[in-house]
């Protein structure tokens, strides 16, 4: 079985620009009421829980619960929700949270709402919404932030509701909540979908409001966009000012944004390296990676591979998954790697995969299949890592896992429906081999419903994606088509190119392909 490896291509692509904005997070920390400074009658119980003495914390909280103490009730709810110091029980957690919320304990209201909004019961989700809307009367910042995310995630409607998201994040932002301002700015940027609502000017204005409130992350976000964003929206003077303020606030990711500006916009690799070095000195790990790249490639300085590798090792020690991946590449891509190279490379690859990099997860899976580790393949581990990578949206992994399902290889049972679904996901991302594989499935009708016009469309698209087999298949099909089929095939190609998802391979009504498990590749 021939699965495509991306190790050699990663030698070029590993250093591509890293995102400068944070991922979406739940608007309030689940254990906020337990980690904040403990005060009042429940102080000892809260301190015990924070220190990890869960059973003792529960023991101390119980007498206070009988007295109706809100903090103690919240602690008991959290203990039952997490199973720390008490039996795990959603019902008991909700019971204690509701009692705590009735005393005015805000964190209990938010935690209760998280549970209710995650429910598959519409009535419970409605209860969560109503509790938050009531809380928003006194605390529009946090409650509005949570409600906005609930509407975004489609927990309160069949589809994400842009207007509701805008309303609630807008209310939270008007209350001066920097995290809500950051979320609102990202909404305007189109980071959460709704491309037709994209407004970069509003996004920058919103980042500016958050930065003006002293949020260092917003200063970096705004500075980065003013320096590195679309040319029409750039403002070097203002961008540099916000970057300077962020550095003064000890937000050292600002060095990364400024270094990228020097490198990619100003085309000054020496100035970029000087900036990255400052970030490296401040402990900013992405700047350490950029500095390593400069020495490895001789950008803005003389090439120095030893220094570059040491910097990568420094970043890896700090927990950088990309650094681990780069170090793995340097070992495993050797023409004749020694056993020590394989062992060290494997260790770095495992760390990169565990760090959540889909590329590394895919490569680790291929490594398990290669029999290079002790001369024995581990298909179970390979499938597990391929699945994680595929679920992370990595097209090569989707294609590789599809190949295994199609052929029943690597210890997985043949499943043409799963194979077709995965090929479709990869093809929708422009993956050439997956596009041709999907064309082949539609052409042969092996385990799926045959559709020759769709096969021609996909084969033609695969050829455009540099798959020679695609051109050959398209010609073979075209030679057999009736005028009606040719017209249908061209229409199918137009549909695909108009950003419609690639056709999914479906099992025929009397087919031999098992339906895929819901939610799984």
Image (cartoon, rainbow, N blue to C red):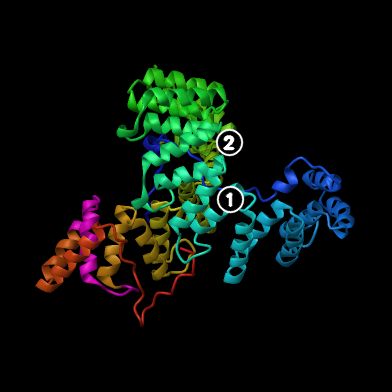
Question: Which of the two discs, 2 and 1, sits closer to the camera?
Answer: 1
Q: What x and y, as percent, mark residue 300?
A: 38, 19
- Name the residue at the right extreme: 63
**Is label 1 in a helix, a strand or a loop?**
loop
How far separated are the C-alphas under marks 2 and 1?
Answer: 24 Å
Query: How many other residues sit within 10 Å of disc 1, few (<14), some (14-19) or many (≥20)?
Result: few
Q: Measuring 21% from the left and 61% from the top, which residue is drawn there?
A: 493
Residue for point 28% across, 57% down: 499
Q: Could you tell me residue 158's position as x and y percent?
A: 47, 66
Q: Which residue is mark 1?
A: 26
Which residue is at 86% across, 47% downward?
41
In the displayed structure, 154 sits above or below 206; it is below
Q: Nearer the viewer, residue 247 or 15?
A: 247
Q: Is residue 456 magenta?
A: yes
Q: Please provide percent x and percent y for residue 105.
A: 74, 53
503 sits to left or right of 119? left
* Quadrant housing the N terminus: bottom left
Q: Quadrant of residue 62?
A: bottom right
The label shown at residue 319 is 2
Residue 375 in sight: no
Judged by its main secondary structure, the magenta piece is helix
Disc tally is: 2
Q: Residue at x 27, y 65 (%)?
A: 440
**Residue 116 seen in this snapshot:** yes
Q: Which residues are magenta?
A: 446-471
């Amino acid at each position: 079985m021939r699965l495509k490896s991306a190790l050699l291509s990663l030698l070029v692509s590993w250093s591509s620009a890293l995102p400068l904005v944070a991922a979406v997070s739940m608007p309030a920390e689940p254990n906020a009421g337990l980690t904040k400074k403990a005060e009042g009658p429940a102080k000892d119980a809260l301190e015990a829980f924070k220190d990890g003495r869960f059973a003792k914390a529960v023991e101390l909280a119980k007498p206070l619960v009988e007295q109706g103490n809100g903090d103690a009730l919240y602690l008991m709810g959290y203990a039952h929700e997490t199973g720390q110091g008490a039996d795990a029980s959603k019902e008991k957690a909700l019971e204690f949270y509701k009692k705590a919320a009735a005393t005015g304990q805000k964190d209990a209201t938010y935690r209760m709402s998280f549970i209710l909004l995650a429910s598959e019961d519409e009535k419970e989700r409605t209860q969560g919404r109503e509790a938050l809307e009531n809380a928003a009367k006194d605390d529009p910042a946090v409650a509005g932030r949570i409600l906005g995310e609930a509407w975004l995630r489609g927990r309160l409607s069949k589809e994400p509701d842009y207007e509701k998201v805008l309303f609630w994040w807008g209310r939270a932002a008007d209350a001066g909540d920097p995290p809500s301002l950051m979320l609102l700015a990202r909404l305007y940027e189109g980071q959460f979908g709704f491309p037709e609502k994209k407004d970069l000017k509003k996004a920058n204005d919103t980042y500016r409001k958050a930065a003006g409130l002293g949020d260092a992350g917003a200063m970096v976000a705004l500075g980065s966009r003013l320096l590195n964003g679309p040319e029409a929206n750039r403002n070097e003077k203002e961008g540099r000012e916000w970057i300077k303020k962020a550095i003064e606030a000890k937000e050292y990711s600002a060095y990364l944004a400024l270094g990228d500006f020097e490198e990619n916009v100003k085309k000054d690799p020496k100035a970029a390296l000087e900036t990255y070095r400052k970030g490296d000195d401040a402990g900013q790990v992405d700047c350490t990676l950029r500095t390593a790249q400069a020495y490895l490639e001789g950008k803005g300085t003389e090439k120095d591979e030893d220094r570059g590798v040491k910097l990568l090792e420094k970043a890896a020690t700090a927990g950088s998954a990309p650094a681990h991946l780069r170090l793995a590449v340097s070992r495993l891509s050797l023409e004749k790697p020694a056993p020590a190279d394989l062992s060290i490379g494997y260790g770095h690859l495992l760390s990169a995969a565990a760090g959540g990099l889909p590329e590394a997860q895919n490569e680790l899976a291929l490594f398990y299949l290669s029999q290079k580790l002790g001369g024995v393949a581990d298909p179970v581990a390979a499938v597990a890592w391929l699945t994680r990578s595929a679920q992370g949206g990595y097209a090569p992994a989707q294609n590789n896992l599809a190949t295994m399902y199609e052929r029943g290889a690597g210890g997985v049972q043949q499943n043409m429906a799963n194979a077709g679904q995965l090929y479709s996901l990869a093809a929708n991302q422009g993956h050439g081999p997956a596009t041709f594989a999907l064309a082949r499935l539609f052409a042969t009708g092996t385990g799926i419903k045959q559709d020759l016009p769709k096969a021609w469309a996909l084969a033609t698209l695969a050829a455009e994606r540099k798959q020679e087999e695609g051109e050959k298949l398209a010609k073979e099909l075209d030679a057999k088509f009736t005028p009606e089929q040719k017209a249908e095939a061209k229409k199918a190609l137009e549909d695909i190119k108009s950003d419609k998802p690639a056709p999914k391979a479906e099992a025929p009504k009397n087919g031999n392909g098992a339906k895929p498990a819901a939610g799984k590749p």
